[in-house]
Amino acid sequence: MTHVPPSPDSFSRLGVGAGAEDPPQVDGKRDGSAGVGPVVADRHGLVPADAVLSAGRDTAGWGVHRVMGLETEYGVHAPANPGAGHSVLSVEVVNAYADLVTSRGGTVAGTEWDYGEESPLVDARGWQLPRSAAHPTQLTDQPLMGEDGSPVHLLTNLVLPNGARLYVDHAHPEYSSPETTNPLDAMVWDQAGDLVALAASQRIAAAPGEPQVLLYKNNTDNKSVSYGAHENYLVTRSLDFEELAQRLLPFFTARQVICGAGRVGLGVTGSSPGFQISQRADFFEEQVGLETTVRRPIVNTRDEPHADADRYRRLHVIIGDANLSQYATWLRCGMTALVLSMIELGTAPEVELMDPVTALQRISHDPTLQATVPLVRPLDGAGPGGRREATGLEILRVYLEAAERHVHRFGMEDGATLDVLHAWRESVETLGTEPAAMSDRLDWVAKYQLLSGYRKRHGLDWDDPRLGMMDLQYADLRPDKGLYQAMLRRGSLRRLVPDERIRDAVGTPPPDTRAWARGRTVDVFGRHVVGASWDTLLVREEGEGPLHRFHQREPLAGSAEQLPGVFDEPAAEGSYGRLLEALSRVQAGPPRHHGHH
Amino acid sequence: MSQQYGSSFEREEDSSNGPDADPTPAPTGAAGQTSTADLDSLLDEIDSVLETNAEEFVQGFVQKGGQ
């Protein structure tokens, strides 16, 4: 890591703490730290302590390393129980998973459906399934009663042993992954969520007389409704949001050529026959805004950091498709992390689209990747008199080449970052020459090739219901029905990690964020947990005695490294006291040096 | 060095294909493209997996609003 930026005058070399020379001005404060996160060993958060930053700039990440997490709203369908409300089915999914975990002696932390009164935090052991067959309509303000006349407890929000949330969001079951620090882990804990959802669905299917509840990792019913697959990335609070939004818009418009999930039909109801790259593109109407369910914006301004708001902003990305492909999920997060690093440090390309919303749809509607979209000025490197238009792939290449220069310039060349850059370049070049060769890595290409082959074999038009069925079934989570699952099993789509690693992530949190403290506490000390959220843990010994509330505003604190031994012997004398001591210690912040545990 | 952050995959220095930690080699040709034979075999399998009542099933897949 010896690369010295070309214009040293505009940079400051930063050291740890008081030893820093010329620390940057960040929001008017001189704190001498490179990077936003806390000082641990030789890093400020995820940023090496000897990092050289641009003057007046700060960053919450380094290369592809950044606090991130993914959310999936699953499509929910009970064909044998057509009268069932979607909220009921979603509640059933959440409760089925709680039932499954607790039946194996495990614990989850849950909160109940709010019947209109204050909803108590409850212990989540021994829940029965709220049978959708018995209660097929919408939930009301009347408690549901079981066959024995006692109230049926309905959990709507779980914190899982892996630190994730599983809950009812609108009319969908949603899995929000725990906080991870790199795109590969983000992918692993996202795919773990698919196993959680599948296990819940199978639990329901195994209940006698209970109609199956099928779950789909897609984003539309092709009847004007769309539901989300969101990404979250922490960025430094010091970054100007207007600058962030303007630099992101062209990238978010173009990145679908790599991470689109593919869709049969054009328009919000899919009524125009054809195939398009993205599930979500047709549902976006604005460039920048706060909404997520109507008039959706390409850049969402929601800002609930669930973290120290002086340090961090949470960028809530709502433009993405739900990816089944491991490669597409990983590269989506990796590319985005690198673009955020460039924006924070002031090296992002200055691409400007004439009309981002129209461009988003135009790029999506052309799986041949030839469609061009108008630009305010020619792309960098196009030279004087260059075209004021570009394809999505050309725009993405501009971001790629800027990212390659950026990583080189700042010395971010660790393995995880270089892997993303290699894959990004390989994808852009292969899509430019032989797009079908990406069918073993990208969802939309795999789906397009599969459906095109089926279409040709049977002489079908794009509006044939069998092609719509294949589009839907690609996202079916069941191993025996899901077309993605079939392709993965055959090796037609690549795995990035062994299956065991994803199975392990169902029950284990990422070790390097506060998700470790949350998930392990729920799993190991569940009998003491009376509440858990992204940044808060509530514990009370055996549900009695004094209530202890722990806030964790720093997502990088509460890691396994900071909590050695705390979760190893929960039955040993004094283990509860040691838990309280440890949670209190990491709440105060991470150690200033190694060895001060 | 490539393990600097502790949660990456094992990286092969000569790999140009990104993180393929799965020891199984790519199933098909050098570029990784699904071969015609593989696609044919896959399409055969799909005929047996596809929901039979496609039109009814797709029509019945109705979702409520989401984000």
Image (tube, helix red, strand yellow):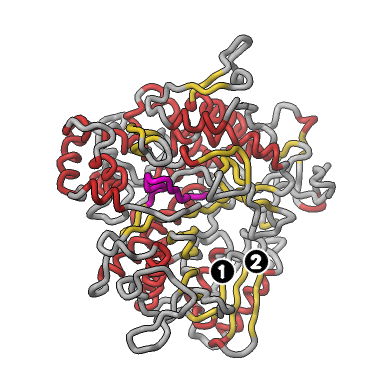
In contact (CB < 8 Å): disc 1 and disc 2: yes
* Furthest residue in direction top, as rendered: A385
Q: Is residue A516 left or right of residue A150?
A: right
Magenta highlight range = A217-230
| Mark 1 lies on residue | A517
Residue nearest the observer in this picture, A254 or A559: A254
Other-residue count near label 2 (Cα within 10 Å), few / some / many at <14 / 14–19 / ≥20: many
Residue nearest the observer in this picture, A502 or A454: A454
- Residue A295, x across and y down, in percent: 56, 44
Other-residue count near label 1 (Cα within 10 Å), few / some / many at <14 / 14–19 / ≥20: many
**Quadrant position of residue A150:** bottom left
**Quadrant position of residue B39:** top left
Going by the numbered disc 2, the residue's amino acid type is Gln
Q: Residue at x 72, y 61 (%)?
A: A592
Image height of A46 relative to A281, above or below: below
Q: Residue at x 57, y 31 (%)?
A: A356
